[in-house]
Image: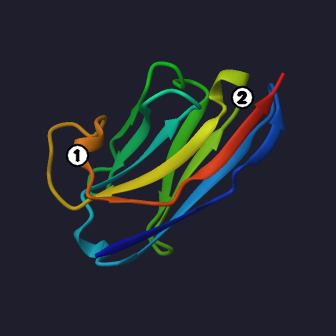
Amino acid sequence: QVQLVESGGGLVQAGGSLRLSCAASGRTFSNYAMGWFRQAPGKGREFVAAIRWRTWNTYYADSVKGRFTISRDNAKITVYLSMNSLKPEDTAVYYCAASVLYYSNYDVQSSYNYWGQGTQVTVSS
């Protein structure tokens, strides 16, 4: 089992920045990748960013490329999502996810086995 706890959400004005954190515990040695997804009101959950644990390769949704950065701290077993130039359309609940299996891609929910509880990000115009 892997437990994920997100933090860092909040209210920010458009153009501002936030950094989300996702602390992992449990059987984290078997993680292949971790990712961030988000779900806006009335919409489905969508991919935001992912990082492969062993190769450090990163992946981003087109909507956040150049504005968001995913990173990790091995010692703390924590993944971060640094969000800059935030827009009102970035408003959503952001979820951290972990995969303990190898997949060719990690931009779909089905590639992940464990999920955090979510943290709210609200961007005001």
Q: Nearer the viewer, residue 63 or 73?
A: 63
> What amino acid type is highlighted by mark number 1?
Ser
Name the colour scheme.
rainbow
Q: Which quadrant holds the N terminus? A: bottom left
Write down the residue under mark 1.
Answer: 111
The picture places residue 29, in percent across and down from the top left corner, at: 27, 74
Q: Residues within 10 Å of mark 1 (few under 14, many from 20)?
A: many
**Tag 1–tag 2 contact (CB < 8 Å):** no
Task: Write down the residue under mark 2.
Answer: 86
Instruction: Give residue 30's mark.
Output: none
Q: Residues within 10 Å of mark 2 (few under 14, many from 20)?
A: many
Q: Identify the residue at image location x=82%, y=38%.
A: 12
Secondary structure state at the residue bearing disc 1? helix
Query: Residue at coordinates 61% horizontally, 28% vertically from top-left?
Result: 67
Amino acid marked by disc 2: Leu
Residue 110 in the image: above or below residue 59: below
The extreme front residue here reads 42
Residue at point 76%, 32% (across, down): 123
Name the spot of residue 76 as percent of width and height, x first.
51, 74
Image location of residue 18, percent across then percent down: 72, 44
Rounded to the nearest angstrom, the CA distance separating label 1 from label 2 is 27 Å
- In this image, 100 relative to 109: left or right? left
In primary-sequence order, the first of circles 1 and 2 is: 2
- What secondary structure is found at the residue carrying circle 2? loop
Residue nearest the viewer, comparing 86 with 121: 121
